[in-house]
Amino acid sequence: MAFACLSFFVVGGLGRLALGAALTDRDKQALIAVAATRTPGASGWMGVLSGIGQGSFAIPAGIAVFLVLLLRGWRRSALCYAVTVLSGWGLNAILKEGFRRHRPGVVPHLDGAGWYSYPSGHAMLAPLVFGLGVYLLTRQSARGVQWTARVTAVVLCLAIAWSRVYLGVHYPSDVIGALLAGTGWAALGVAIYSPLEPHPDVTPFTPPMAN
């Protein structure tokens, strides 16, 4: 809960700075520097990563995670996932409308982009769809499986965020704020719905019988 509150405090502060000239100028310089490194091969891979974070892929992936949680009998986890992801999607729309930061126009866009820029929808929903999904799916897995899956999810979220900057459709601060917002919202969802299904390593407390 504390992490979620801190995340949104930073998201709000960064959003205010993003509307000012100082941070926007730094963002523009960063975009120009990134655009100078573009190659056809790298641009293709960045397009793939961006596509993974797009609704056409993320929505079916989210539905699959929800169904797997239900099939395992983890109804509370499935409810946590569905409510957190859907409300996070709505929150992203509210934040975009609230800050109304326009898309960068300093470098050519290599991917489609619409609506406002802060925070990035791709980068905010990635920790929710993929990060939270992996966390819930691996809660009762072996430690090695948990570590591998969760590190992979973190790398994927960062890669999706980076792809949006590389493709020129978001400022760096857009994706930083989005990652914080998505991670904070996921943490809040887990905190609200805790305790989830008990981990097998945790033995429920049973009071001693009175003699």
Image (cartoon, helix red, strand yellow):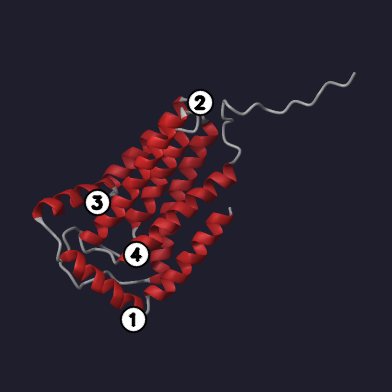
- Label 4 vs label 2: CA separation? 37 Å
- Residue found at the far top of this picture: 211
Disc on the earlier residue, 4 or 3: 3
- Residue found at the far bottom of this picture: 21
Disc on the earlier residue, 1 or 3: 1
Q: Which residue is mark 1?
A: 21
Disc on the earlier residue, 4 or 2: 2
Q: Which residue is mark 2?
A: 73
Q: Which residue is mark 4?
A: 174
In what element is the residue under mark 4?
Answer: helix
Three-letter amino acid code at the position of disc 3: Ser
Three-letter amino acid code at the position of disc 2: Gly
Name the residue located 38 percent from the left edge and 51 percent from the top edge.
125
Q: Nearer the viewer, residue 22 or 118?
A: 22
- Residue found at the far left of this picture: 40
In which quadrant of the rendered view does residue 105 lie? Answer: bottom left
**Residue 3's spot in the image, x, y percent?**
54, 55
Name the residue located 40 percent from the left edge and 48 percent from the top edge.
127
In what element is the residue under mark 1?
Answer: helix
Three-letter amino acid code at the position of disc 4: Asp
Single out the mark in the foreground, 1 or 2: 1
- Label 1 vs label 3: CA separation? 27 Å
In what element is the residue under mark 3?
Answer: helix
**Tags 4 and 2 in contact by the CB under 8 Å rule?**
no
109 in relation to 22, above or below: above
Name the residue located 38 percent from the left edge and 36 percent from the top edge.
149
